[in-house]
């Protein structure tokens, strides 16, 4: 990883780990419009480069419902959503991390389903990634399984059966059955 990528990922992690303030009166429609404008000015509206810190701060410090308000305001003003704006401004691992963080706030079950699918994409299965995803998201796995079936036309169990074998397959299938006994 390059030093520049490490710096950008460090900024993203720092913003994410800072405590959020009480957001009840603060996160309103007016503030969402201001943050949509700030997001634009830090990215697509910036003449040279991208102000990742501002973008990461908005993504990481905003509660999910408020971030949806910012996304709606952004679409209303610029005819593109926050994710598409990120795709235009960032590259590589920084882009993936920022889009994943945004997705986990705006549409977490779809994001997790896509992550599980990505661990099985290409040649070979990312067994560690797949195992970690099934284990880490077990508490929401039933909703992820529904979303995965809707998005990809196949269950997570089917994906595991197609992509793995032996005791490893049995272990993953048992983890899925614990989360959703009818799977």
Image (cartoon, grey):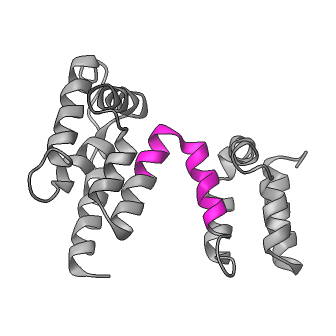
Rendering coords of residue 7 (x, y %): 21, 70
As drawn, 20 above or below 94: above
Residue appearing at x 30%, y 32% in the figure: 74
On screen, residue 49 versus residue 13, left or right, reads left
As drawn, 52 above or below 146: below
Residue appearing at x 36%, y 28% in the figure: 66
The count of marks equals: 0
Q: Residue 106 colored magenta?
A: yes
As drawn, 84 above or below 106: below
Q: Nearer the viewer, residue 10 or 151?
A: 151
Rendering coords of residue 181 (x, y %): 88, 47
Q: Find the residue positioned furthest to the left.
A: 47
Asked if residue 133 can be seen in this view, the reply is: no
Q: Which picture quadrant has residue 159?
A: bottom right
Q: Quadrant of the N terminus?
A: bottom left
Q: Residue 182 colored magenta?
A: no
Q: Kindly report the secondary structure that dominates the magenta region of the rendered protein.
A: helix
The range drawn in magenta is 101-118
Residue appearing at x 91%, y 45% in the figure: 182
Q: Which picture quadrant has residue 98?
A: bottom left
Rendering coords of residue 139 (x, y %): 67, 47
Rendering coords of residue 86 (x, y %): 33, 51
Q: Find the residue positioned furthest to the front.
A: 79
Asked if residue 99 can be seen in this view, the reply is: yes
Q: Which picture quadrant has residue 64?
A: top left
Q: Nearer the viewer, residue 171 or 145?
A: 145
On screen, residue 108 versus residue 35, left or right, reads right
């Amino acid at each position: 990883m390059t030093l520049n990528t490490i710096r950008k990922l460090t900024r993203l992690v720092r913003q994410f780990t800072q405590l959020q303030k009480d957001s009840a009166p603060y996160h309103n429609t007016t503030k969402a419009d201001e943050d949509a404008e700030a997001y634009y000015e830090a990215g697509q509206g910036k003449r040279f480069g991208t102000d990742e810190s501002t973008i990461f701060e908005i993504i990481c410090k905003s509660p999910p419902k408020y971030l949806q308000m910012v996304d709606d305001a952004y679409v209303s003003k610029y005819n593109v959503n926050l994710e598409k704006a990120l795709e235009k401004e960032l590259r590589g691992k920084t882009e993936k991390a920022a889009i994943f963080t945004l997705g986990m706030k705006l549409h977490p079950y779809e994001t997790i389903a896509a992550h599980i699918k990505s661990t099985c994409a290409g040649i070979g299965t990312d067994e560690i990634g797949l195992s970690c995803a099934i284990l880490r998201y077990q508490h929401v796995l039933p909703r992820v399984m529904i979303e995965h079936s809707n998005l990809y036309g196949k269950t997570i169990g089917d994906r595991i059966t197609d992509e793995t074998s032996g005791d490893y397959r049995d272990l993953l299938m048992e983890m899925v059955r614990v989360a959703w006994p009818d799977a």
